[in-house]
Image (cartoon, grey):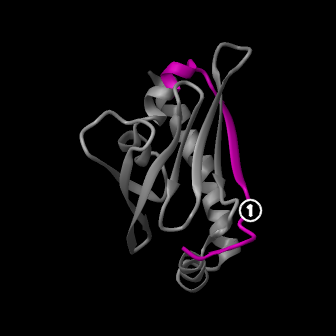
Amino acid sequence: MTTTQNAPLLEATTEIAATPQEVWAVIADPRALGGLSDQVWRTHVVGTDPVGLGTRTVNINRRGPLVWPTRAKVVRFEPHRDYAFRVKDNGTTWSFALEPSTGGGTIVTHRREAPQGTTQISRTLQDKVLGGIEDFDREMSSGMEVTLQRLKALLERS
């Protein structure tokens, strides 16, 4: 898999009035998490085992009229603390880190990391089809904020 450098770390953080256990119950279920994202429309878990380290998913992404699949694998799974999956198709790792807050809730940090860069095909598609690499990264960053706000609304209305 060929990768290119210069993929910035994207990060968004919010505090949610719910325990780490309550937040974990949502973020560690890829099927529930997919519906909170602006871009990930649906996620299918491959197999029947409970979600955990090594679980594979197929994600259906959408942006306007464009629809495309991606494949991912859970690469970190520390209950109530850290959940991360790596997208095979572009080389990025998406994660949620949970920390108890002093007010009894949870601080949730959502990240997109690409320490080895992203795949050349991904960057070409971002540049030629999705409006440009920098604009797409800004869109991803805004989408992460939306995901966290939807997660917060879901958990705080319960």
What are the residue bounds of the magenta stretch? Answer: 1-23
Three-letter residue code for mark 1: Pro
Name the image quarter holding residue 95. top right
Left or right: 49, with 95 as reference point: left
Residue at position x 74%, y 62% in the image: 8
Residue at position x 52%, y 40% in the image: 150
Query: With respect to residue 116, does 113 lie above or below?
Result: above
Task: Please name whichever residue, 84 or 69, is drawn nearer the observer in this view of the structure.
Answer: 84
Task: Please name whichever residue, 33 or 51, is drawn nearer the observer in this view of the structure.
Answer: 51
Name the image quarter holding residue 131. bottom right
Residue 82 placement (x, y as % from top left): 59, 33
Residue 14 placement (x, y as % from top left): 67, 35
Name the image quarter holding residue 149. top right
Of all residues shown, which one is farthest toward the left? 48
Residue 41 placement (x, y as % from top left): 39, 56
Residue 5: in magenta span: yes
Residue 76 placement (x, y as % from top left): 54, 40
Residue 13: in magenta span: yes
Of all residues shown, which one is farthest toward the bottom? 128
Q: Quadrant of the N terminus?
A: bottom right
Judged from the image, the secondary structure of the residue bearing numbered disc 1 is loop
Q: Quadrant of the C terminus?
A: top left
Which residue does the numbered mark 1 point to in the structure image?
Answer: 8
Query: With respect to residue 93, does 122 lie above or below?
Result: below
Residue at position x 40%, y 43% in the image: 30
Left or right: 155, with 60 as reference point: right
Residue at position x 48%, y 62% in the image: 88
Task: Please name whichever residue, 19 or 58, is drawn nearer the observer in this view of the structure.
Answer: 58
Query: With respect to residue 131, does 95 lie above or below?
Result: above
